[in-house]
């Protein structure tokens, strides 16, 4: 009898939903951020859809480098769409409530897409490494089959490794407050509300970050170190310039992505004094790369610019190369 009562009381204490309060410390005027965030989201959707349509439409872009760029566009759309509709609903309609299952699903989706983006950057770095260091073997090493295998391996790696995050979060007992000082369900923000020990949650997130993001970043910069060493051995300045220009767009995106990851990690140290800074950086880190990745490639890749012109009907007079 006492055991049944204890179980009943425990179940009553379990919260049924979380409240995403938005940006901590600036609740009164945070709705003014909705317009730039909405514009960034629309830009991300339109630009990445244009990337996908252009790559599909143009036979000259049916190459591994552009196929990987198309996969990156899909990941960017997924990452932005995972968080932005809920954030805009909070800022516009004060729809702050989110069920536990929806919150845990968002935790899984955010981390999966973030790790996928890092993994695709690694695949793109390897593609450029083979193209520059082993140009004669490139077509036999990097082809459509290898792109499919690399993509599936990244999907499996990130899809499986991130499963424990929401599973561990769901096993915690949330018996007190249910307000999260955030615009989205971050793993650490959610588990900080738990009444029991969350050490395993924090340790696993740290291990996941080091294994995926940290491992990818190390391999990416190792690939570019080998690329630079190979390029510096070229006798022709023109050949050196051409080799570097083929990977400049990718290098810009990589530096931007991993710099943002490092800045986001560092800003959490200031979270207690100025709590809205890490929250704002977290939101921007999930929406800015999807919005600006296509623009960087469009500005620096001639083949893609020509493809855009044809798709948009602006390049009828542009001859096919």
Image (cartoon, rainbow, N blue to C red):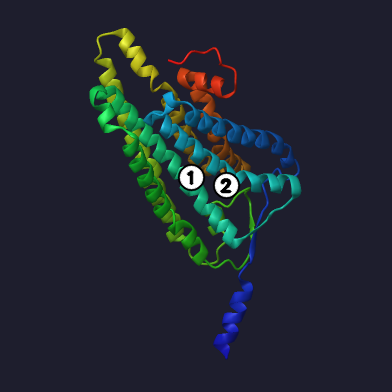
Name the foreground residue: 52 vs 21.
52
Image quadrant containing the N terminus: bottom right
Q: Residue 23, can we see it? A: no
Q: Position of residue 166 (x, y in %)?
A: 49, 58
Q: Position of residue 180 (x, y in %)?
A: 62, 54
Q: Residue shown at 25%/13% (left/top)?
A: 234
Q: Residue shown at 38%/20% (left/top)?
A: 246
Query: For residue 175, what is the image quadrant?
Result: bottom right
Q: Is 23 left, or right, of 230 in this rendering?
A: right
> Label 1 near label 2: C-beta < 8 Å?
yes
Q: Does 109 appear above or below 234?
A: below
Q: Residue 128, can we see it? A: yes
Q: Which mark is residue 82?
A: 2
Q: Does 232 appear above or below 214?
A: above
Q: Residue shown at 56%/15% (left/top)?
A: 316
Q: Position of residue 319 (x, y in %)?
A: 48, 13
Q: Does 160 appear above or below 28?
A: below
Name the foreground residue: 193 vs 114.
114
Q: Does 228 appear above or below 157?
A: above
Q: Which mark is residue 235?
A: none
Label 1: which residue?
113
Q: Position of residue 139 (x, y in %)?
A: 28, 28
């Amino acid at each position: 009898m006492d055991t049944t009562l204890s179980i009943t009381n425990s179940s009553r204490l379990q919260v049924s939903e979380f409240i995403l309060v938005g940006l901590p410390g600036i609740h009164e005027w945070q709705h003014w951020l909705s317009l730039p965030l909405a514009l960034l989201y629309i830009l991300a959707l339109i630009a990445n859809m244009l990337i996908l349509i252009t790559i599909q439409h143009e036979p000259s872009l049916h190459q591994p480098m552009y196929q990987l760029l198309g996969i990156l566009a899909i990941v960017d759309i997924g990452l932005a769409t995972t968080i932005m509709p809920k954030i805009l609903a909070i800022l516009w309609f004060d729809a702050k409530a989110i069920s536990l299952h929806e919150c845990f699903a968002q935790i899984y989706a955010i981390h999966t897409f973030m790790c996928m983006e890092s993994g695709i950057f690694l695949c793109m770095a390897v593609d450029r490494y083979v193209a520059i260091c082993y140009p004669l073997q490139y077509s036999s090493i990097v082809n459509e089959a290898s792109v499919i295998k690399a993509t599936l391996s990244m999907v499996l790696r990130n899809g499986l490794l991130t499963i424990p995050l929401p599973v561990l979060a769901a096993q915690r007992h949330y018996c007190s407050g249910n307000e999260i000082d955030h615009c989205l369900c971050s793993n650490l923000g959610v588990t900080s509300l738990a009444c029991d020990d969350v050490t395993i949650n924090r340790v696993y997130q740290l291990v996941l970050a080091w294994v995926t993001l940290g491992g990818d970043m190390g391999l990416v910069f190792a690939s570019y170190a080998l690329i630079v060493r190979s390029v510096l051995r070229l006798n022709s300045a023109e050949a050196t310039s051409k080799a570097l220009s083929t990977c400049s767009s990718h290098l810009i995106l990589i530096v931007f992505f991993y710099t943002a990851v490092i800045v986001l990690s560092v800003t959490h140290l200031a979270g207690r004094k100025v709590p809205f800074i890490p929250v704002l950086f977290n939101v921007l880190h999930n929406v800015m790369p999807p919005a600006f990745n296509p623009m960087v490639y469009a500005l620096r890749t001639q083949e893609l610019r020509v493809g855009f012109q044809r798709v948009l009907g602006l390049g009828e007079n542009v001859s096919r190369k």
